[in-house]
Image (cartoon, helix red, strand yellow):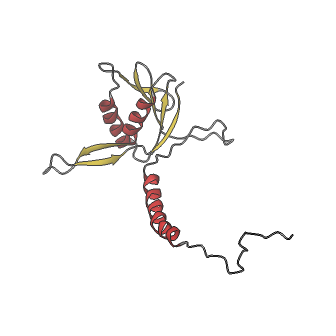
């Protein structure tokens, strides 16, 4: 006796087409959003220069170089060879206002210099590195005399290198 097959034979019709309309609608919204946020994330990044261990062969005289050394006892400001100022902690906190004033006076004396180094002892918290870098990079000065609440951002030493204190 022949067996009867009770299954449906596949039709030889064309396969159904895939509807990609919803996917394309998602891409139309998603691509501009990703492009816009990529631009804003680039603005928020601070580029740092790490000190190099290898020399270029010829010793170069860098001229004036600002070094801010963050130590447990306070801040030291140097010129790459010697310490030119020491700012001890006040009431357990680093004196960032005095550092800012000192950075402004150094920038006035050396307007062509844009590079500075911030060196830390290994036990210093990361938060203090960020605070000192912000002070070394720029400061706010009072703007127009008519509006006492208006401040202008002044760029100081914008090219910052980070390293470990000697």
Q: In the image, what residue occupies the spot 66% across and 76% down?
A: 15
Residue 134: image x %, image y %? 38, 39
Q: Quadrant of the C terminus?
A: top right
- Quarter where residue 158 is shown: top left
Q: Quadrant of the N terminus?
A: bottom right
Q: How many marks?
A: 0
Residue 2: image x %, image y %? 85, 71
Q: In the image, what residue occupies the spot 44% across and 57% down?
A: 37
Q: In this view, does 42 lie above or below 164?
A: below
Q: In the image, what residue occupies the spot 50% across and 32% down?
A: 80
Which residue extends farthest right?
1
Which residue extends farthest bottom?
13
- Quarter where residue 110 is shown: top left
Which residue extends farthest front?
1
Residue 68: image x %, image y %? 44, 31
The residue nearer to you, when weighing 133 against 4, is 4
49 horizontally vs 154: left or right: right
The residue nearer to you, when weighing 10 against 97, is 10
């Amino acid at each position: 006796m022949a067996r009867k097959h009770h299954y449906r034979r596949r039709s030889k019709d064309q396969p159904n087409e895939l509807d990609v309309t919803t996917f394309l609608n998602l891409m139309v919204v998603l691509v501009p959003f990703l492009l816009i946020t990529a631009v804003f994330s680039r603005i928020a990044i601070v580029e740092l220069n790490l000190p190099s261990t290898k020399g270029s062969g010829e010793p170069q005289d860098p001229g004036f170089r600002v070094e801010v050394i963050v130590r447990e006892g306070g801040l030291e400001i140097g010129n790459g060879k010697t310490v030119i100022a020491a700012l001890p902690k006040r009431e357990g906190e680093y004196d960032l206002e005095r550092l800012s004033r000192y950075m402004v006076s150094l920038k006035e004396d050396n307007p062509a210099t844009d590079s500075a180094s911030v060196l830390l002892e290994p036990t210093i918290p990361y938060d203090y590195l960020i605070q000192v870098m912000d002070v070394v990079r720029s400061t706010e000065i009072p703007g127009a005399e008519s509006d006492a609440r208006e401040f202008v951002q002044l760029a100081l030493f914008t090219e910052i290198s980070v390293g470990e204190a000697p």
